[in-house]
Amino acid sequence: MSTVENIVLLSKGLLGSNVLPALVDAGFKVTILGRSENNKHGLPAGVKFGVVDYNSIDSLEAALRGQDAIVSTVGMEVIPGQKLITDAAIKAGIKRFIPSDFGALTTDPNASHFPHHLGMIDIQKYLHAKADAGLIEYTILSIGAFTEFLGSDLLIDWQHKCAEIWGGDRALVSTTSLAATGEALASALRNLEATKNRNVFVHEYAVSQEQYLDMAKKYAKPETKWSVVNIEDAETELNRRAGVLREQGDMASIFSFIKGTLLSGKYSSHYRHTDNSLVGLEELNEPGFKAKVANLCS
């Protein structure tokens, strides 16, 4: 494959809204597909919009005709539907599919059994099989944790001003902003051969729990009182959280388990080797990352 020019962006949610300007700035002709006309407002000049039924292969195929590549940023509820999207893409002659699969650990073999990963693992296997058959190409972009999500309870319980320090703070967590994720996606589509049928790992900064807590303390209100919970036995605590997740299966238990997998140091939440140079993404220095944290804490 030489080049792609016509890109379909599936969904214009939080991530999609950051990917869109990167695709436009890179010179692609972008069409957004959504479920409702309500999503077409506020689009940049030249960006097209179409309504599609994600549950209909005929609707998907018709919408994808004449396009070169798909960037999917659909939410968790549509992740399983990416199998049907893949089938429609093949029928429509799509060359490259970038699925909605940006998680820190979704391509870590040791984490493939996590309940919240199963849908994405299923899509990965499906794409691998179709690519091996020469029917379509794919790129999976792993970005660590979204930097903007650090302002939620991903590393720190902001409501109770409490931080968990796992295993003596040995673990680092790769992080990438939403905007940088968009830039990496656009660059991957301009570098097709090097990103063909593979997992591309990027990050802007790798932060430790203690380091992030120090930044949070610096930028929070001076009178804020912080508490720290030291978790020395990561294995036992992860097993406990996995049990809670199996029993309850709610968002709180999912989030608690995800935090443990990121911070325990047992999984590849820190990308020691990245493909930043492949997609032209610069790593942040500590002052640059601190500036982003300051915005989150303000």
Image (cartoon, helix red, strand yellow):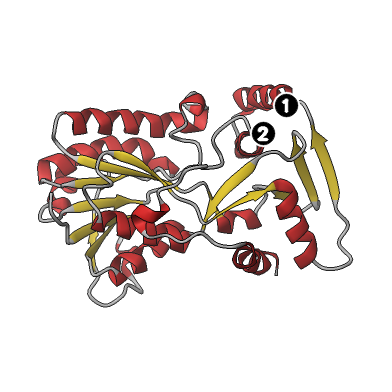
Q: Pointer 1: what residue?
A: 237
Residue 204, placed above or below residue 80: below
Crowd tier of the residue under label 2, counting other residues whose Cα lies within 10 Å: few below 14, some 14–19, many 20 or above: many
Q: Is residue 11 visible?
A: no
Quadrant (top left, top right, bottom left, bottom right) of the C terminus: bottom right
Amino acid type, label 1 = Glu
> Of the numbered discs in the image, which one, if any, rests on residue 219?
none
Rendered residue at 15%/57% (across/down): 3
- Viewer-proximal residue among 126 and 286: 286
Q: Position of residue 54 (x, y in %)?
A: 27, 45
Amino acid type, label 2 = Ser
- Viewer-proximal residue among 282 and 88: 282
Q: Pointer 2: what residue?
A: 264
Circle 1 or circle 2, nearest the eye: 2
Residue 237, placed above or below residue 170: above
Rendered residue at 51%/46% (across/down): 144
For this view, does 131 lie left or right of residue 205?
left
Q: Position of residue 176 (x, y in %)?
A: 51, 55
Q: Is residue 95 visible?
A: yes
Element on which disc 2 rests: loop
For this view, does 204 lie left or right of residue 47?
right
- Viewer-proximal residue among 270 and 134: 270
Residue 235, placed above or below residue 83: above
Quarter of the image where one finds residue 97: top left
Q: Residue furthest bottom?
A: 45
Crowd tier of the residue under label 1, counting other residues whose Cα lies within 10 Å: few below 14, some 14–19, many 20 or above: some
Cβ–Cβ under 8 Å for marks 1 and 2: yes
Rendered residue at 60%/37% (across/down): 258
Mark 1 vs mark 2, CA separation in Å: 9 Å
Q: Position of residue 238 (x, y in %)?
A: 67, 26
Q: Earlier in the sequence, mark 1 or mark 2?
A: 1
For this view, does 113 lie left or right of residue 166?
left
